[in-house]
Amino acid sequence: MVPAAISTSPSVTSCPSRRLSQRKSQSYCRTVSTMSNHVSKSTLSVSVNSIADPDSRTCECFDLHNELVPYGKAWAWQKELVRQKKASIQSGGDCPDTLIVLQHQPVYTMGTGSSEEYLNFDTKNAPFDVHRTERGGEVTYHGPGQLVMYPIINLRNHKMDLHWYLRSLEEVVLRALLSAFSIKASRLEGFTGVWVGDEKLAAIGIRVSQWIAYHGLALNVTADLTPFQWIIPCGLRNRRVGSIKGILREAYSSINCGYVDVLIPGECHLVDIACDALIEAFAEVFQLEVCRKPLTEAFLMGKSF
């Protein structure tokens, strides 16, 4: 499902695809696995039961992970997809799941009940645009080097349980980090998201309307974390924000390697690896056959289809 027309500012290419061979990626992951307590190939201690449905369902996937998409544009797209899915259900039609993966231009977003006390700036003089949305959770930052995954899915086809859905999104990130980078991340009791030690790598915020879920998760891959200093991320004081790149640099440094920047793949490559891992883990956790679909240039330029 693609909306008929969304007129917004154009997206900006973040990084052209620079995929290296799968064998090189696998070799890199094996190397990293021995480098720190947080980088391990051991099995995850926490898991979420997959859907016990033998019939494979499909999920259309729009992979824009090399695009910097304005937040307002992606938000409007999500709401239009939700509208289309509701209409399809009401008419008795098919309602396939949709997955969008992208990066955003720098922006702060707040949940429906977010408090401005977690902003370390005056909203009239904000460093970036600020959007108050209908998702749950407090303020967070999106920007280049952070992968954002928006599943727009019908929970009637999965499990009508919001706690289960949140834990499943966490599981997607946990599996992706372990499989692609051998990073052993974890949940933190009482909080939503994915952590490595006391650093939060992935934030999650969702909205569910008539059991259609949207918004989703954000994973810091190579993002500049400076903009997080201008807010209290997710309303959590005395907690740090981390990134995959930072965890890997720490891992290499811990073995006294003098060639950290040489050994860690380039930023575009890290984002490519993380994107593929997230999509694969999403398919596994939700037992979906993910079908990547191209997006017309008209949409990317904010024109009618």
Image (tube, grey):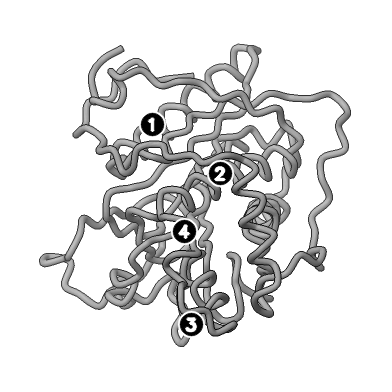
Foreground label between 2 and 3 = 3
The residue that mark 1 highlights is 77
Between the C-alphas of marks 3 and 1, the distance is: 32 Å
First in sequence, mark 3 or 1: give its number. 1
Q: Quadrant of the C terminus?
A: top left
The residue that mark 2 highlights is 208
Is the C-beta separation of discs 3 and 1 under 8 Å? Answer: no
Foreground label between 3 and 1 = 3
Question: What kind of residue is marked 3?
Answer: Arg
First in sequence, mark 2 or 3: give its number. 2
Name the element at disc 2.
Answer: strand
The residue that mark 4 highlights is 221
Question: What kind of residue is marked 2?
Answer: Val
Callout 2 crowding tier (Cα within 10 Å): few <14, some 14–19, many ≥20: some
Image location of residue 43, percent across then percent down = 82, 63
Residue 84, relative to residue 101: is it above or below?
above
User: Residue 239: which disc?
Assistant: 3
Between the C-alphas of marks 4 and 1, the distance is: 24 Å
Between the C-alphas of marks 2 and 4, the distance is: 27 Å
Q: Residue at x 60, y 74 (%)?
A: 196
Foreground label between 4 and 1 = 4
Between the C-alphas of marks 2 and 1, the distance is: 16 Å
First in sequence, mark 2 or 4: give its number. 2
